[in-house]
Image: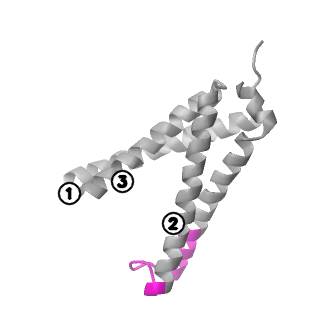
């Protein structure tokens, strides 16, 4: 029996693949800057994480295209991380704005734009969690 991939799974898989692919040059640039400067261990760790996430995104997208359950599970794990990262970053930005009357030289408008970006990222994570836990979607991967 041939499995049918829904349009929603296809759209999420393509989006994840393209965003992850576009994130790779940024991750490599971050690592190059970290290696050529007098960076500490935290910067190297962030660089490694910046490289790991797009690679996992590409792997998850391939799993979604092939309707592999591990691709769906990896997507759920990454969606959870995206949501958690977004929530904590929003909290950090708001707290910095309140406590220091600004975020390291950024204007209030820039901070609002950052908060909206991370809010969108959080909503994307929640949307992925919702979509890939629906019974009709799950049965495509079994």
Which coloring applies here?
A: one colour
Drawn side of residue 113 relative to residue 24, left or right: right
Mark number for residue 89? 2
| N-term-proximal mark, 2 vs 3 | 3
Closer to viewer: mark 3 or mark 1: 3
Drawn side of residue 109 relative to residue 32, left or right: right
Whole-percent x and y of residue 10?
70, 33
| N-term-proximal mark, 1 vs 2 | 1
Q: Is residue 126 above or below residue 8?
A: below
Q: Is residue 44 above or below residue 55?
A: below
Q: Which residues are magenta?
A: 99-115
**Alpha carbons under labels 2 and 3: distance apart:** 15 Å
Which image quadrant for residue 141?
top right
Whole-percent x and y of residue 108?
52, 81
Q: Is residue 22 magenta?
A: no
Pointer 1 local density, CA inside 10 Å: few below 14, some 14–19, many at least 20: few
Residue lying at 23% horizontally and 58% vertically, measured from the top left: 40
Q: Is residue 111 above or below residue 3?
A: below
Mark number for residue 20? none
Q: Circle 1 is placed at which residue position? A: 37
User: Quick one: which residue is furthest to the top in this view?
Assistant: 1
């Amino acid at each position: 029996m041939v499995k049918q991939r829904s349009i929603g799974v296809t759209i999420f898989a393509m989006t994840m693949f393209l965003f992850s692919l576009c994130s790779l040059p940024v991750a490599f640039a971050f690592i190059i800057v970290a290696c050529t400067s007098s960076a500490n261990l935290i910067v190297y760790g962030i660089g490694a994480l910046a490289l790991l996430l797009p690679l996992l995104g590409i792997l998850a997208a391939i799993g979604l295209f092939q309707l592999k359950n591990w691709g769906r599970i990896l997507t759920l794990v990454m969606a959870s991380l995206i949501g958690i990262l977004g929530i904590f970053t929003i909290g950090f930005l708001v707290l910095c704005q309140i406590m220091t009357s600004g975020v390291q030289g950024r204007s209030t408008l820039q901070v609002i734009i950052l908060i909206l970006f991370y809010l969108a990222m959080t909503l994307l994570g929640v949307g992925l969690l919702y979509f890939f836990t629906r019974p009709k979607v799950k049965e495509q991967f079994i």
